[in-house]
Image: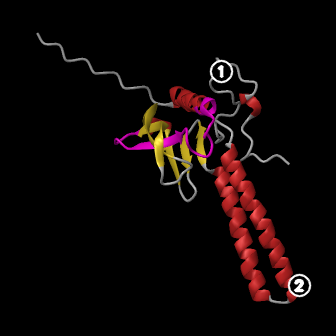
Amino acid sequence: MPLPFLTADRAFDAMDDDVALPFDDHDQWRRPYRPGPWRVGAAALALLLASFVLFAGVIIVAAGTMGGAVVTFVLAGLIIVSALRMLRVGTWVSRHGVRRVGFLSTTTVAWARVTQVRTAQQPVRWLGLPRTVQGQALILGRQGGEQIALLTDHNADFLSRIEAFDRAADTVEAWNAEYGVAAAPVAAAPATR
């Protein structure tokens, strides 16, 4: 069974270096990189924990305690939903804009509102924890001066995968170049006589 939230398009495997947007359908939201091993591993451990909690719920049902079983099944459901949400976290792009999906919130910015997409050296959070280290971040500038860090080279997708970070940053920049609004030309000064 294919899991679309886990599989990045196989187009990246067969992608030529001169093809920036390897997808056929640009209207569909897609992640321009594969989820990293840290993210997939954490989700797998959470699903393993959920299986043990479900097994405990079956044992509680067999023992005849329905109240405890309901609580156990609800807890297992929350763990499963959290693991699936953890796999959805990341940056997604389409013809309509760029979407930064967090664990509890999602921010979508239309390409028309993007002023710049650039890579910068700055302190970044290590695996999403409060500890910061020096690293690279892909920064999205929005109209109004607000900036959003889309990707970092020390998050759960790119830790120890610098080449993957560079390829993902280049791909998001290519989407911005394709669908973003070009910088407005500087208006010429009025001619004086």
- Disc marking residue 19: 1
- Tell me if 181 is positioned left or right of 19 in this view: left
- Residue 123 drawn at (x, y percent): 43, 42
From the viewer's perspective, is residue 183 above or below residue 68?
A: above
Q: Which residue does the image show at 64% across and 17% down from the upper left?
A: 18
Amino acid type, label 1: Val
Contact check, label 2 and label 1, Cβ < 8 Å: no
Highlighted range, magenta: 142-165
Q: How many marks?
A: 2
Q: Earlier in the sequence, mark 2 or mark 1?
A: 1
Whether the magenta-drawn stretch holds residue 173 is answered as no
Task: Give the residue furthest to the top.
Answer: 193
| Type of the residue with mark 2 | Ala
Residue at x 49% of width, y 31% of height = 180
Q: Secondary structure at mark 1?
A: loop
Mark yes or no: residue 18 visible. Answer: yes
Give the CA separation, mark 2 to mark 1: 58 Å
Crowding near the residue tagged with mark 2, few <14, some 14–19, many ≥20 C-alpha atoms within 10 Å: few
Measured as percent of width and height from the top left, residue 126 is found at 53, 47
Q: Residue at x 82, y 83 (%)?
A: 60
Which residue is the site of mark 2? 62
- In percent of width and height, residue 153 lies at 55, 38
Q: Nearer the viewer, mark 2 or mark 1?
A: 2
Whether 156 is among the magenta residues is yes
Quadrant hosting residue 141:
top left
Label 1 crowd bin: few (<14), some (14–19), many (20+), radius 10 Å: few
- Quadrant in the picture for residue 161: top right
Residue 115 picture quarter: top left
